[in-house]
């Protein structure tokens, strides 16, 4: 495995530590603690035990027989992260960081959330590990993900609405960063995706790589060979890098990351950073950012709150530039059609984020042979999105 990031926390030209001076002691403490614990057998054993007993790992690799038949292309397998406790892959990372917070003797954790799945996972581990949790969420996201807001509150977390800016994930992160600056000695910021200052992108990638390690073992057991193609949605990029990273050194495997195309790339209302963005610095890291010619952050749009963010993880930026991973996008309408397709064909309601990956499989299937194998990371379940979609379609309860 290629050792990235480098000692400076860089993925090629991307990454780094662009944070206020007041946060550097906490960043350096986290860096030192993780450097020690990532090779500590007792820590890793505790982490793996929590994944098994609390999260429910390993998650199945499911052969989508009807979807495969309908699309008429490769054999399609779904990595069922939707079956994790709390309903998404986010819990893998929150378990790991909760253990780190304990080792640093920090009893308060803060977090941001967009679609609410990270917030629910944070609230869950806070309850399980006896930690105090405050979760920041844009008020627009709170409206479209009201069920997850209530779940966080049921679990004992404080949910603080952010009414600034676009009132979405970017603004929630900004508010959480302000909190952390004020309470840095007692508080750990439990970041939810492979974003932010080093060492966060590396730590979260490492915790989420359990997805790809399991998928690798499971597909070899099921098919006796590695897949030809991996597909996952990309917001910040934790579920996708979690699937892709254990296969990075297998050059014959095509990897496809799917961003939010929103209302179309020409509309200006999307969150496709690689199609419409450029290198810049946002919230601690250098990466691809949707910004104007003056460096001001552009507004974003996606039907899925978890993909509605103007930057992408720096490791993804490096793989984009090198060509190792191909990045594309799916529009809101394509994702909604894919949402319906998987629900009706397999009896699995996907998260709207994951539906973007299903949409790419629909497009790509006719380009692949029936003997080929595709794995799609089903990063979350769609319970959280049902109310939103019902309202969009004029349903009444």
Image: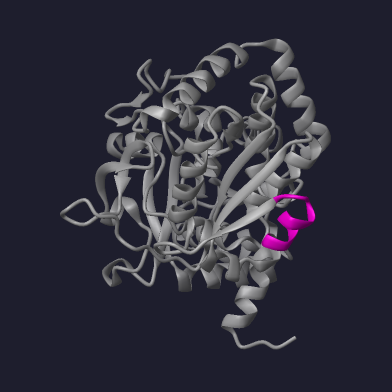
Specify the quadrant of the image occupied by residue 51. top right
The residue under the point 66% across, 30% down is: 96
Lateral position of residue 279 relative to residue 144, left or right: left
Q: Which of the two residues, 70 or 170, is positioned nearer the viewer here?
A: 170
Picture coordinates of residue 233 (x, y %)? 50, 52
Residue 89 makes an appearance in the image:
no
Specify the quadrant of the image occupied by residue 148. bottom right
The residue under the point 55% across, 52% down is: 74
**The furthest residue to the front:** 182
Q: How many marks?
A: 0
What main secondary structure does the magenta stretch of the protein show? helix
Magenta span covers which residues? 149-157
Q: Which of the two residues, 361 or 369, is positioned nearer the viewer here?
A: 361
Tell me if residue 75 comes above or below residue 340 in the rendering: above
Tell me if residue 337 comes above or below residue 148 in the rendering: below
Does the magenta run of residues contain 25?
no
**The furthest residue to the left:** 293
Picture coordinates of residue 147 (x, y %)? 70, 66
- What is the image's colouring? one colour
Picture coordinates of residue 357 (x, y %)? 52, 56
Q: Quadrant of the C terminus?
A: bottom right
Lateral position of residue 322 relative to residue 247, left or right: left
Residue 26 makes an appearance in the image:
yes
The residue under the point 63% across, 38% down is: 109
Tell me if residue 246 comes above or below residue 344 in the rendering: above
Picture coordinates of residue 230 (x, y %)? 51, 44
């Amino acid at each position: 495995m290629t050792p990235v990031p480098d000692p400076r926390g860089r993925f090629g030209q991307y990454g780094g530590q662009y944070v206020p001076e007041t946060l550097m002691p906490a960043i350096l403490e986290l860096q030192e603690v993780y450097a020690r614990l990532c090779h500590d057998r007792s820590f890793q054993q505790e982490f793996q035990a929590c994944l098994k007993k609390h999260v429910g790992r390993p998650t199945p690799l499911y052969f989508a027989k009807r979807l495969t038949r309908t699309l008429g292309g490769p054999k399609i397998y779904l990595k069922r992260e939707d079956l994790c406790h709390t309903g998404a892959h986010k819990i893998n990372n929150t378990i790991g960081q909760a253990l780190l917070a304990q080792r640093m003797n920090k009893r308060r954790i803060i977090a941001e959330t967009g679609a609410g799945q990270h917030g629910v996972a944070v609230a869950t581990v806070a309850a399980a590990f006896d930690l105090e949790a405050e979760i920041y969420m844009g008020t627009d996201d709170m409206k479209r993900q009201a069920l997850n807001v209530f779940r966080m509150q049921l679990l004992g977390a404080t949910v603080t609405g952010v009414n600034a800016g676009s009132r979405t994930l970017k603004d929630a992160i900004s508010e959480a960063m302000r909190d952390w600056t004020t309470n840095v000695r007692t508080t750990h910021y439990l970041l939810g995706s492979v974003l932010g200052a080093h060492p966060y992108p590396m730590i979260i990638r490492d915790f989420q790589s359990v997805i790809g390690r399991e998928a690798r073992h499971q597909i070899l057991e099921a098919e006796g060979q590695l897949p030809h193609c991996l597909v996952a949605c990309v917001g910040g990029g934790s579920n996708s890098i979690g699937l892709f990273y254990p296969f990075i050194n297998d050059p014959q495997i095509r990897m496809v990351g799917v961003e939010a195309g929103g209302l179309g790339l020409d509309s200006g209302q999307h969150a496709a950073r690689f199609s419409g963005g450029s290198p810049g610095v946002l919230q601690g890291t250098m990466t691809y950012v949707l910004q104007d010619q003056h460096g001001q952050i552009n507004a974003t749009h996606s039907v899925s709150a978890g993909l509605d963010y103007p930057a992408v993880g720096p490791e993804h930026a490096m793989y984009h530039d090198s060509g190792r991973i191909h990045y594309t996008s799916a529009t809101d309408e394509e994702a909604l059609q894919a949402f319906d397709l998987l629900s009706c064909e397999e009896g699995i309601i996907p998260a709207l984020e994951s539906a973007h990956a299903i949409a790419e499989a629909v497009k790509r299937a006719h380009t692949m042979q029936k003997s080929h194998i595709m794995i799609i990371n089903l990063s979350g379940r769609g319970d959280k999105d049902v109310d939103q979609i019902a309202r969009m379609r004029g349903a009444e309860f």
